[in-house]
């Protein structure tokens, strides 16, 4: 038996066929277009996501003789997607999690005194990052589209629910607790949509998907629309919770960081809801078919790998993202250059939506290598900020995954900055692997978490060396400059 895992990320879709031993038998990948209608706005065409899904899955299936017995889904979270319930066509582009257009709306709600109650119910904060304010914006600015939501013709959801609708030819409109808990509409304690929040944000509850467990019989693919496959959809989770599951972080205190477009640090906190300080969030990690929920504390960093992409696409300093390591190694340090990559605002633990990127310390001797190295250092500094806020100290080990985790220089610098070991798994596509694990549990490919833990294999362990505290002090000073500039703008 094998599992087909679909990882619908922010810049593309990855498909993995995962064998029973937990290895990746084959992979497919397809990018899709990014749209930036105005500064700070980010949109995706849902049809592009669907076509990329079909292309990536077809490539993965061509790469192996294994036939999947079930499908698992993981996805970019918080992105607001609308589609026609009958035709499945989207009436407008999706508003992506990175989009900052609702910053003023968040200020309005905060000034009206709503944030304490919202945080109490959701474990989140009022920030453009989350789904609900995007929906409020649509209701206020695109009434002709929102009329379809009010009438029931247009469905509202996140990328997971959109893909399930497409995979099932419209038969299912569902989401899971890990994605629902990122919308500002879900109650952590109640485990369902909160009428009070739906009223606050002006979202009709009937337009939202049904909330189902993270694994079990969630739907079935329609072979007429999905590559001839008629198999159960038996696992789904938001990408960061899926990575936590794929890293087999099943015990309280286990911590992982996914280095993708942004970086996301999650710590398993078990079955009790805690409400951390220091700008961290509480979220649902996963829910079993019998209803037990595991929670996580999360620190969300908006731009890390995307900063490397900016070096490539925006500045032309590197030809490919992997080239960043070789270029950075040509200099011993950043030469005093500090880059705060607040290209879409600052996330945890600072939460400054209006912050913008800043580069300091440039001299006549600064080269592209210094800027590239400063970008990699910034990623490690951002993760250190979150981990120290999360743990009030170091963690026993940080499990690292995602595209940038293949950068050995970054991983070593991260271990140095944290003062703790960093472990990189043999399968670094752990978001997709987590989706596969959930689906496999739901369909009987694997029987328990203990069995899944046995499939996790170590690629490399990075032991901490000397920590450059002076460089970190320069980083903290630059972050404060960025925050001050945002407040005074």
Image (cartoon, rainbow, N blue to C red):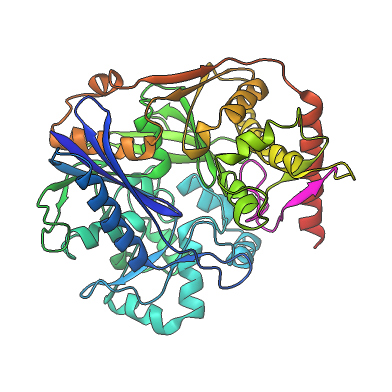
In the rendered view, does 197 fall on the left or right side of 343? left
Q: Residue at 75%, 31% (x, y): give it.
A: 331
Quadrant of the image occupied by residue 486: bottom right
Name the main secondary structure of what is drawn in magenta.
loop
x and y, in percent, of residue 429 in the image: 38, 36
Is residue 190 visible in the rendered image? The answer is no
Query: Which quarter of the figure is the C terminus placed in?
Result: bottom right
Q: Nearer the viewer, residue 174 or 341?
A: 341
Query: Which quarter of the figure is the N terminus placed in?
Result: top left
In the rendered view, does 274 fall on the left or right side of 63? right
Depicted 127 relative to depicted 152: above or below: above
Quadrant of the image occupied by residue 195: bottom left
Is residue 370 visible in the rendered image? The answer is yes
Per the rendered image, the range of residues in magenta is 343-361
Q: Residue at 47%, 74% (x, y): give it.
A: 138
x and y, in percent, of residue 312 in the image: 61, 51
Q: Nearer the viewer, residue 376 or 151?
A: 376
In the rendered view, does 113 fall on the left or right side of 175? right
x and y, in percent, of residue 269 in the image: 44, 28
Q: Residue at 66%, 21% (x, y): give it.
A: 416
Q: Residue at 76%, 39% (x, y): give it.
A: 370
The answer to whether residue 276 is magenta is no
x and y, in percent, of residue 117 in the image: 53, 52
The answer to whether residue 352 is magenta is yes
């Amino acid at each position: 038996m094998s599992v087909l895992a679909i990882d619908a990320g922010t810049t593309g879709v990855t498909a993995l066929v995962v064998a029973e031993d937990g290895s990746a038998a084959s992979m497919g990948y397809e990018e899709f277009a990014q749209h930036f209608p105005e500064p700070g706005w980010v949109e995706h065409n849902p049809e592009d996501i669907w076509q990329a899904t079909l292309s990536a899955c077809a490539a993965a299936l061509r790469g192996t003789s294994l036939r999947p017995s079930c499908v698992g889904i993981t996805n970019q979270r918080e992105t607001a997607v609308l589609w026609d319930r009958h035709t499945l066509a989207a009436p407008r582009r999706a508003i992506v999690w990175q989009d900052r257009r609702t910053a003023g709306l968040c200020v309005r709600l905060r000034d009206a005194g709503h944030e304490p109650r919202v945080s109490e119910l959701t474990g989140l904060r009022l920030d453009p990052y989350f789904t609900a304010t995007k929906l409020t914006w649509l209701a206020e600015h695109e009434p002709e589209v929102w009329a379809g939501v009010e009438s029931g013709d247009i469905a509202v959801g996140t990328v997971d629910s959109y893909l399930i609708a497409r995979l099932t030819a419209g038969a299912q409109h569902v989401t899971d607790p890990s994605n629902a808990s990122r919308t500002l509409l879900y109650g952590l304690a109640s485990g369902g949509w909160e009428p009070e929040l739906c009223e606050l944000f002006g979202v009709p509850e009937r337009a939202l998907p049904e909330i189902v467990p993270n694994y079990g019989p969630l739907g079935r693919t329609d072979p007429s629309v999905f590559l001839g496959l008629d198999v159960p959809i038996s696992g789904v989770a938001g990408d960061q919770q899926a990575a936590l599951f794929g890293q087999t972080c099943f015990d309280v205190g286990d911590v992982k960081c996914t280095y993708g477009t942004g970086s996301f640090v999650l710590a398993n906190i078990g079955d009790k809801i805690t409400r951390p300080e220091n700008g961290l969030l509480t979220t649902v990690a996963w829910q079993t078919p019998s209803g037990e929920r595991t929670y996580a504390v999360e620190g969300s960093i908006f731009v890390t790998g995307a900063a490397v992409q900016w070096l490539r696409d925006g500045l032309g300093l590197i030809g490919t993202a992997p080239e960043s390591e070789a270029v950075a190694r040509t200099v011993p340090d950043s030469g005093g250059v500090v880059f705060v990559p607040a290209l879409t605002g600052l996330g945890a633990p600072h939460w400054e939506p209006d912050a913008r990127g800043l580069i300091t310390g440039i001299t006549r001797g600064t080269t592209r290598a210094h800027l590239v190295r400063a970008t990699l250092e910034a990623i490690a500094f951002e993760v250190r900020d979150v981990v120290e806020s999360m743990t009030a100290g170091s963690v026993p080990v940080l499990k690292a995954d995602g595209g940038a985790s293949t950068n050995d220089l970054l991983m070593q610098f991260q271990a140095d900055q944290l003062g703790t070991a960093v472990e990189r798994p043999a399968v670094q596509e752990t978001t997709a692997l987590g989706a596969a694990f959930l689906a496999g549990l739901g369909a009987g490919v694997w029987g328990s978490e203990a069995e899944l833990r046995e499939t996790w294999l170590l690629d490399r362990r990075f032991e901490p060396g000397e920590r450059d505290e002076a460089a970190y002090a320069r980083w903290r000073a630059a972050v404060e400059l960025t925050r001050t500039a945002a407040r005074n703008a």
